[in-house]
């Protein structure tokens, strides 16, 4: 499994100031919540937890000041749940006058596994700069230490690098000011306790990712990705219903398109908004999906009217990826589908074109854009027919992909979601896929698992959907998840795409969709 | 050689608010000087330099921005001389948008030897917190990075821990705002070029230690020690003549005495002034020396009148260390004499009593304190006579110390400085000492070497004094000193009392005395 960085730093961008101003005006007020730790803990070996690392309470948090700490002493605070926010703590010295600075290492960890990993040992390809660790010198004690950076964590390890032989450091009043653009929703009561916990953790995941934009992960990369936004927006309609945040994000993407009209796969919003130089065909097309979902929820036609040309542009650009009636994969504007590059993506890509083109037609219908409706409907028809004709193996009752006619899960799932097959035929495809391709291997993203699960529901296979919800998301909870992870491979629970838990994101947007799935397919 | 930490944190202190207010009012205005680097350098093996580490220029500093730096790249800035101050630098990113923080390690080094030493390898007894190293995360580039802490350095090593695979960091406009309470003196021209360079480096050493107090070392411990103050004040009268800074420091010590009247060996002045819980008999007595030297320079009788009782108290306390007409070493109030604890200190201690008591009598005479004059003069007479009678070995023409009648350099030096022997007898003692005890071994402090050198001059042995000046201080310069070091053992040039150069102080107050010695004994 590999993720390839795109470097296209010669691409020039449009900056639509009117759109960006609208985005700016929609910046949410961040809600602050003070949270104090619930216990002092230490890590323990626990084979039932992620990376075989669990935690054990060692003392009440009230006793923290009694832990007089010198060189190499450390203590771990447990805040009881995952939070995104700003950390502060009071530190004083005990003993002789402070004859040297205090040097303190602070490690912020979303999961216990991060605490046992030495950052010096990390040599993965992903930037070390994401490691949530600070080493600071404090020249004057006592101090109320307020760290200026935001962290995503449940645990904080305080390690004294050194005091001096003449005094110890004593800590007190640890606190996180947790931030989000939303406060906890009143969660609905579900009759199935497993579904209830799946639901609750997904809501927490979504909440912690909802900052001034929908971030992909508050630990890392803290960024607005279109592929994540689409799913977060759906989960948001099912829970917090902060529609303005979706609108803001749509305007951010629409406000920064490349000169050729393509929407970048993500934008940076820490500081002045800035587009990334990464382009993914499916992510660009999901602008249309996200806009359509937004309009369905809000009926906000004036926003649709403004953003329609941007959505249309993505569709028109995507037409260049169609050759001989089929989607064709181009390296310079690839479809993502999933992190894994170990399967053929052309059939899934074709389905995603159909899926998003249908949503575009739905938008065009609202605006009575007759010409667009006719043109794109014709393309949908062509792509759907060629899919059935050339890509559906009626003997296997499965879609095949690429020159080797590879059968993979993504093709089936997206053809079902795109409603190229429907009704009993969709059910047959998904049942056959389950029979032949389960248990799934080589897929590490909740993003792909979400689409598989939703495809079951779309195909009317409710029980299979519930089973997968439980097999995937409950498994994370059992391994210790307070929020859903960026990457989880059930067949290899400790898998990290970066070779280390310290740069993995354990609260990641694309894991938050159970709230949406449960509300849409299982409640009522 | 060992230095023992005193821990007396049960000692209670007086706070004389009137004295402390006076000290506060005398706080000097700190002078700021902007300095830019002169070259980009790298360390090279050079057996003629400290720890066999020299430097080599690798590029012009103007080319710094062209060094595009990614994970593990580093560059070293050379500011051309030692400075104490605040560092800033501009940083931008080059390439794709900044998709991760920049993590940067900055090492500040007074000497090249520090640059090749990995701080992770340091495990000495002295606090690691003094290591001048910062690891910082920068979330938003470009930035004008201004570090809030003060450092003492000539070299700054910038090491990129990581950027991301998509961009590099580029640095520009490095600058130090150098601070001191004095600006460079117009240095006198000396005919001997070696003496000139000895002189110049001692003035730079003094300047960099002159901050809001006379610090012992601006890298470490940044603190006002009485033993250092006495020497710095003498060098200051020979150069900058900032008499108010001496006065301020006298009031700081006088303002914070223990309940039993003793002056602490040092005080902390970062933040609210605070006395340390370390007590050294000779340092306490040097309050009298420093006050006497100050009055001789300034004729400031009103300050003398205010501080005389504090000086007198030190003398009275010291009387308790006299038993059977001799100074006796007590562990709970030891004499320091030198870092080394490998020699018997009683004879040197007795001489220091005589030396400082004489200065006290001189002060008492200015105030016509007849009773004090008589009382202490009698003690001086007794101590001097017992020294000659019991401690002077007329056969060897040397003073002996302790029950084993040990002959050490400190005894001779201090008996000469205390003028227990004078004229040709002093010359004989010092010549004999040179014959028998040179080359000196086991003494690592410029503090002790200063007293040996001055004893030569006091004994009229000018050439021997010059020879030692050159043998000791020029040797440091040849090894690469821009300022004189806390510790230097000529027979073992790489010796560090801490086992590592990274916590050694290479600009240290008690090395600054050549300016005083040259002015007093060699100019005119």
Image (tube, coloured by chain):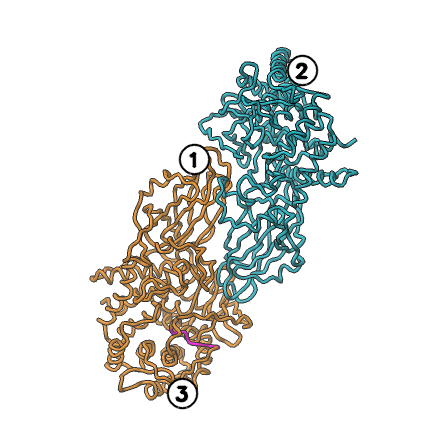
Chain colours: A orange, B cyan
Question: Mark 1–mark 3 contact, CB under 8 Å?
Answer: no
Horizontal arrangement in the rendering, residue A297 relative to residue B481 (left or right): left
Magenta extent: A332-337
Give the residue furthest to the front: B395
**In which chain is the residue bearing label 3?**
A
Quadrant containing the N terminus of chain B in the rendered view: top right
Q: Earlier in the sequence, mark 1 or mark 3?
A: 1
Question: Residue A329's spot in the image, x, y percent?
Answer: 43, 80
Q: Residues within 10 Å of mark 2 (few under 14, many from 20)?
A: few
Q: Position of residue B475 (x, y in %)?
A: 67, 41
Q: Nearer the viewer, mark 1 or mark 3?
A: 1
Distance (Cα) linking label 2 and label 3: 112 Å
Q: Position of residue B318 (x, y in %)?
A: 55, 19
Query: Crowdedness of circle 3 by 10 Å Cα count: few (<14), some, many (20+)?
Result: some
Report which residue position mark 2 lands on: B365
Residue to which mark 3 is pinned: A325
Given residues B40 and B303, the one toward you in this image is: B40
The answer to whether B485 is drawn above or below residue A476 in the figure is: above
* Near-viewer residue (A261 or B399): B399
Cβ atoms at labels 2 and 3 below 8 Å apart: no
The quarter holding residue B307 reads: top right
């Amino acid at each position: 499994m590999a993720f390839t960085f795109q470097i296209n730093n010669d691409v020039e961008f449009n900056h639509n100031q009117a759109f960006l101003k609208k985005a700016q005006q929609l910046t949410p007020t961040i809600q602050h919540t003070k949270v104090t730790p619930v216990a002092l803990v230490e890590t323990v070996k626990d084979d039932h937890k992620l990376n075989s690392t669990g935690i054990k309470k060692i003392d009440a948090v009230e006793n923290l000041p009694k832990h007089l700490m010198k060189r190499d002493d450390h203590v771990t605070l447990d805040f009881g749940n995952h939070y995104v926010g700003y950390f502060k703590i009071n530190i004083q010295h005990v003993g002789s006058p402070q004859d040297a600075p205090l040097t303190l290492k602070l490690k912020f960890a979303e999961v216990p596994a991060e605490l046992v990993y030495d950052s010096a040992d990390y040599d993965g390809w992903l930037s070390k700069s994401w490691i949530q660790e600070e080493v600071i010198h404090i020249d004057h004690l006592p101090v109320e230490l307020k760290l200026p950076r935001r962290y995503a964590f449940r645990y904080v390890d305080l390690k004294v690098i050194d005091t001096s032989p003449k005094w110890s450091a004593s800590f007190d009043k640890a606190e996180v000011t947790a931030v989000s653009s939303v406060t906890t929703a009143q969660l609905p009561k579900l009759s199935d306790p497993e579904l209830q916990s799946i639901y609750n953790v997904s809501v927490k995941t979504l909440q912690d990712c909802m900052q001034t934009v929908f971030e992909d992960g508050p630990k890392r990369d803290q960024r607005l990705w279109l592929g994540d936004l689409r799913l977060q927006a759906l989960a948001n309609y099912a829970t917090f219903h902060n529609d303005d945040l979706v609108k803001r994000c749509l305007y951010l993407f629409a406000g920064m398109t490349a000169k050729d009209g393509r929407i970048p796969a993500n934008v940076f919003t820490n500081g002045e908004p800035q587009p990334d130089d990464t382009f993914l065909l499916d992510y660009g097309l999901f602008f249309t999906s996200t806009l359509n979902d937004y309009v369905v929820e809000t009926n906000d036609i004036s926003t649709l009217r403004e953003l329609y040309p941007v959505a249309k542009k993505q569709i028109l650009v995507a037409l260049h990826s169609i050759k001989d009636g089929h989607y064709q994969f181009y390296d310079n504007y690839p479809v993502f589908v999933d992190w894994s590059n170990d399967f053929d993506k052309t059939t899934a890509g074709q389905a995603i074109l159909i899926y998003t083109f249908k949503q575009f037609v739905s938008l065009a219908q609202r605006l009575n854009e007759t010409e667009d409706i006719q043109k794109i409907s014709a393309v949908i028809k062509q792509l759907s027919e060629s899919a059935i004709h050339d890509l559906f193996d009626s003997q296997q009752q499965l879609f095949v992909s690429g020159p080797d006619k590879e059968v993979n899960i993504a093709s089936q799932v997206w053809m079902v979601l795109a409603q190229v097959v429907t009704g009993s035929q969709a059910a047959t495809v998904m049942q056959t896929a389950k029979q032949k391709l389960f248990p799934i291997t080589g897929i590490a993203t909740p993003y792909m698992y979400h689409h598989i699960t939703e495809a079951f529901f779309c195909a009317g296979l409710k029980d299979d959907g519930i089973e997968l919800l439980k097999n995937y998301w409950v498994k994370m909870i059992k391994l210790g998840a307070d929020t859903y992870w960026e990457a989880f491979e059930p067949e290899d629970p400790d898998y990290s795409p970066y070779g280390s838990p310290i740069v993995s994101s354990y609260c990641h947007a694309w894991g938050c969709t159970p709230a949406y799935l449960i509300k849409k397919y299982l409640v009522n």
